[in-house]
Amino acid sequence: MRLREAGGRALARRRGLAVLGGVALAALWGLAAAPAAHGGTFRISQCAAWDGAAWTPRAMLAPLWRTTGGWIDSSCGASAGRMAFVTPNYRLPYEGLARMFLTLPEATAHTSIDGLWLDWTATPQSPSSDPAYATVWAGETLLRQIDSGDGTRPDAADRLRTPAGTRGIYLQLWCSPRDGPGWCNWSSPGLVVRGLSLDLEESEDPAVRAGGSLLDGTLQRGAATLSLQASDADSGVRSIEAWLGASELGRVDLGASCAD
């Protein structure tokens, strides 16, 4: 039996039935005692999703986000949508910072962030007495820093790896005190995120229960029944497959339930 996790690969396989004489079947110990599947990877996206070559529009899931020193103005969900990070009066004092945090919800307690794809820009400054920088962090680990006026092209993405066990990231605007007391100023939001895709790794194994006359341990002939019930703690189940030797008995595709 094969169980496929949301966004994942084939995760479990057990061929527990044998073909006898081409007609009669014997139900052995396999499906009923199938081992736990292995956890896999899946992806969620904010504002736009990266498929390795291009971005496609997505919504922003507001409950995943919180901010300090500013707020998010979102136009996500349509072409050219964006998350604009706004600071009061489009400015920061020297040594001032503002952050936008994304944290995985408690409902996905067995999942961590394996890496991310980011399409972002740091807005060029208006006349300012100090320079500003945009950064992205995983805990205390700096993943990437860009200067005001820098960023990715709209058709590209920064690929950033995260430390093991990462459950959240944050993007930050910081006003350097390099030139002494003063301000960092912008004529519009200082940080813009056009797309963010998170590669997630789930450690909890999916589970499956099997029943039906095909598994009652007796010699089988003609039609028999098989029922499968699959569950997954965090990401959901994409598909379930049942096999008899090298022959596929059936498949249920649940891909539509695995959206972001």
Image (cartoon, helix red, strand yellow):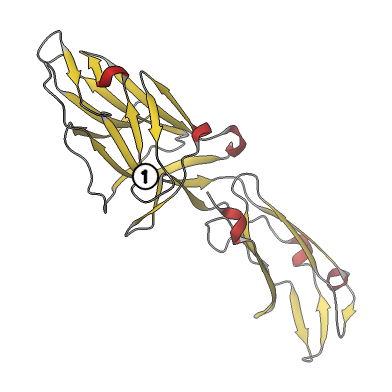
Q: Residue tagged by mark 1?
A: 81
Whether residue 163 is visible here, answered yes or no, is yes
Left or right of residue 107, residue 55 in this image: left
Amino acid identity at mark 1: Gly
Q: Which one is in front, 161 or 20?
A: 161
Counting other residues with Cα less than 10 Å from the Cα at mark 1, is it few (<14), some (14-19), or many (20 or more)? many
Quadrant for residue 164, please give it: top left
Task: Indicate the position of residue 252 as horizontal and vertical percent values.
Answer: 68, 67
- Position in image of residue 26 (x %, y %): 83, 79
Q: How many marks?
A: 1
Out of 91 and 166, give the one closest to the viewer.
Answer: 91
Image coords of residue 75 (percent x, y): 40, 40
Is disc 1 placed on a helix, strand or loop?
Answer: loop
Residue 176 appears anywhere in the view: no
Q: Among all residues in the image, which is located at the extreme top?
A: 181
**Is the residue 122 above or below the residue 215 in the image?**
above
Question: Compared with residue 45, is residue 138 higher up or lower down, i.e. above or below?
Answer: above
Say which residue appears at 76% left-offset and 84% top-offset.
Answer: 19
Nearest the eye: 229 or 63: 63
**Left or right: 87, with 230 as reference point:** left
Q: Quadrant for the N terminus, please.
A: bottom right
Q: Is residue 4 above or below residue 132?
A: below
Q: At which x and y percent is residue 25?
A: 82, 82
The quarter holding residue 173 reads top left
Specify whether 7 is left or right of 17: left
Residue lying at 22% horizontally and 49% vertically, measured from the top left: 153
